[in-house]
Amino acid sequence: MNYQRVFVTTVLAGLSAVLAACGSAAPATSAQVSGLDTSYPNALNARGQLLIGTVRLEEGNGPAVTKEQAAKLIPLWQASKSLTVSGTASQAEMDAVNNQILAAMTAEQIKAIRAMQLVQADMQAFYQMLGVTVASGMTPGQGQSLSPAERATRQAQMGGASSSVANVDYLLALLQRKAR
């Protein structure tokens, strides 16, 4: 358990240093993350909207990510994945990474993602496309309020954390191809 905490802390510290050097770190405010609009019925959370929205941009549904953006987004999505897998991340840490992802994207890209009005059914369809089974009654990303022990128990019951990161792995592979 301590190894995971050290790993996540190291990843976040490195990420912060890189972003500070680039001068692109965004302030960690919930208002910026919520700027994606999660108030409509069955709306995905900000992370889900950014993830599926970015994939859809790459599929031609708006302004695609540039090679330079892909290079900036890769460590951010890796940090998001690490936080998800750790099971110990606070909402503030997740919001901070989401804000940094938002800062790496253009206003046109964010506008296009907002216009997609992504809902839980979009995430379910994405998981189906990936061949990932999510237990009925469970929504990806559920369990954020659970303790680390409760989250570990739920992941064990669900067959591991693979369903919670399969979508990020797909996006990371897409971004890595783009950044080459």
Image (cartoon, rainbow, N blue to C red):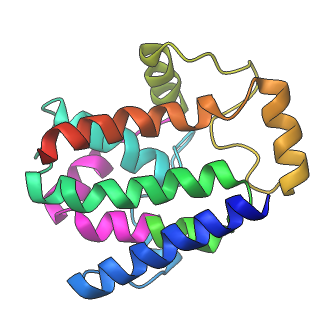
In this picture, residue 97 sits left or right of residue 83: left
Name the dominant secondary structure of the magenta segment: helix
Residue 103 within the magenta-colored segment of the rendering:
yes
Residue 47 in the image: state x and y as whole percent. Answer: 48, 52
Task: Tally the marks.
Answer: 0
Q: 35 or 83, which is in the foreground?
A: 83
Q: Is residue 144 above or below residue 117?
A: below
- Residue under the image location 56 percent in, 41 percent down: 41
Q: Nearer the viewer, residue 16 or 58?
A: 16
Where does the C terminus fall, quadrant-wise? top left
In this picture, residue 115 sits left or right of residue 122? left
Where's the N terminus, which quadrant?
bottom right
Does 15 lie within the magenta span? no
Judge from the rendering whether residue 139 lies leftward or rightward of residue 108; answer left or right: right
Q: Residue at x 49, y 30 (%)?
A: 123
User: Vertical placement of 88 versus 123: above or below?
Assistant: below
Q: Looking at the image, can residue 165 be seen?
A: yes
* Residue stretch in magenta: 98-119
